[in-house]
Image: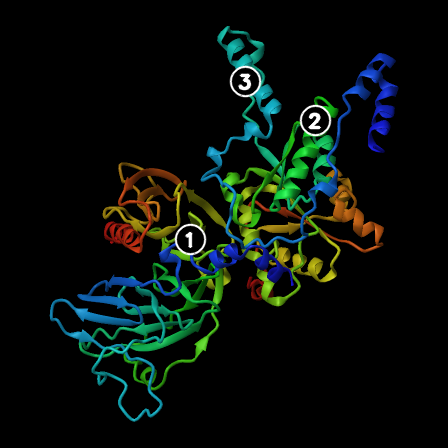
Amino acid sequence: MGRRRWNKKHPDKALAQQQPRRPEDAADAPVRLLVLQPNSTVVGIAMGGRATFVDYKSGSQIQVAGPKPASSAADVAGTVAAPCGPHTGTLRVLQFSPDGKFLLTGADDKVVKLWMCVSTAPGGAWHCVAAWRTPKKASAGGFTLSGSHALFADKFGDVLVGSVPAVGGEGTAEATASEPAAQVPSTLLGHFCTIVTGLAPSPCGRFLATSDREYKVRISTLPENPLQGSYEIQGYCLGHQDFVSCIAFAVQPDEQPDEGAAGKVRPSVLLSGSGDGTVRVWDYETCTQLSSYVASAPAAAPAAELEAGAAAEEEGE
Amino acid sequence: MPMSPKRSREDGGKEGKPHQRQKTKEEVVHPRKRFFRARAHSNPLNVADFDVPTRPEEFDWSEHFPEFLKECHDRQLQQQQSREEGFAQSSRLPSPESPAVRFVDIGCGFGGLLVKLATLYPNTLMLGMEIRDKVTAYVRERIASLRREHPGSYRNASVLRTNAMKYLPNYFKKGQLTKMFFLFPDPHFKTANHRRRIINTHLLTEYAHVLAPGGWLYTISDVPELGEWMKVKLDSHPLFERVSEEELAADPAAGLLVQSSEEGQKVARNGGETYRNVYRRLAAPRHLGATATVEAAV
């Protein structure tokens, strides 16, 4: 009763609320993703609801087995001519595990899937080994450093965790038989009611950095067993004036993970790109800003967001 | 007006007659609630139309506590001067750090708890946070008129209009607060809305971030199911531990929970029962049993 009366008094406000405030906030804004497979020469590109994986050295395309059609007479692996997407909605999460053995995909069909990349046969198809149902559409994803768990965030702001099944030597035959049933993941942590836009484990393995649309980058402790949940916040990297679109860690190549900050070893830093057009560099243990670079004009169009995102990802690899 | 004669009668006993006549001339008018009526509930998920500081260091607290901070600043200058002049006594005194807000009343409503706490802890800065605009304006007027009426008191209390569920880390540094109060929070009965409850696992992690180790978190509700929910969530969070009844009995703030706020007085008038849960923030996470972690989803 209350809402209808209010809308009658303020018809302009009702209209303005229905339309998104900015083009990139619209539900069907185009999403373009690009990933490199570690220890390999494969590039993954996702555009809207379709993903393509190309080996850039040989030029051959890797097939990713999509959802089987109702009449499942055809073979699953390698016979699909056109790149059919592994999901039915817009792809929003596309990440490889640190060792390159697994691929994590998440889309607007509220399912996050884990694919095993069979590295022996370069032309072989990748098949799904695990799936999780998310209550809302997934918005970001990643793996822990050891690749033991897959982390993915949804539009509620929750970061969920699923365990990656152990890879046997040749135990892939049974996995191709059927699509695994979607399980319910455990919750790791949550940003309150804001979309999580980026997710990255720290190089030392002790922390997880997550960014959201409320201008915040949060550093939380990542426990040994993420299924138990993360309850301690290391700090917040605050400074951005607009939504944070992406984060990545820049690892100094000569740093040993178990060495302290002794000597002249430069520590790893965290980079974040934002809709305010800046890319900022942070010391993630003390959550202090080290420097800031203007990458583009503040966000007025979706193009600005992607520029800042591409810059941060390049520096982070 | 029924209020002003009562006030001058109270003050008349302390000061002499000429003073009393002076007081009645410039009577302190307290705000009337009826001019600040607002809906009881406000959606915490709405996009903010108020300003939020980017970082705690950038927020100017002197707007809220002008005399308090000015006094501390003067004391700091004095100490610095006397140290420069080489007085031996000043080196004994610890240099006073710029004071920070230590107590926060989340969802302070019409400010009942805040004004009682202000006189109970006159040297501690405390802040009320409220999301409704009109109610915040009422509390601001109330504190201003109390400061005029009792010069020297109520300088340590203030109110802020903000969404505490989203923006706490923007106002407070890590471990800054020593007490947090959640009096009669919105129960959000529908299961789909349970994630909006102000005590849930994810938000408790944020509260543990702004609370110093050893700090206390006070909650009270008149809804039995909500009281049980808050107890379960706090018990299953490894950074919080229940405070014993003996410690509660000795704590002056705990005694205020039931009757000090307007909501509490309404509950008492209707003869309702209240469920109090007070927990302490631990310095290191405690080990939970296996069953506790299963319940901790949201």
A135 versus A170 height, above or below: above
Q: Which residue is mark 2?
A: B147
* Relative image position of residue A80 (x, y in whole percent): 23, 83
Of labels 3 and 2, earlier in sequence is 3
Q: Is residue B284 visible?
A: no
Q: Nearer the viewer, mark 1 or mark 2?
A: 2
Chain under callout 3: B
Q: Are marks 1 and 2 on the same chain?
A: no
The residue lying at 67 percent from left, 37 percent from top is B139
Q: Which residue is mark 3?
A: B76
Which one is nearer the viewer's eye here, A302 or B14? A302
Mark identifier at residue A183: none
The 10 Å Cα crowd at callout 2, few under 14, some 14 to 19, many 20 or more, is some
Mark identifier at residue A212: 1
Chain under callout 1: A
Judging from the image, what secondary structure is the residue with disc 3 in? Answer: helix
Q: Quadrant of the N terminus of chain B?
A: top right
- Alpha-carbon distance for marks 1 and 2? 40 Å
Q: Quadrant of residue A63?
A: bottom left
Left or right of B297? Residue A108 is left
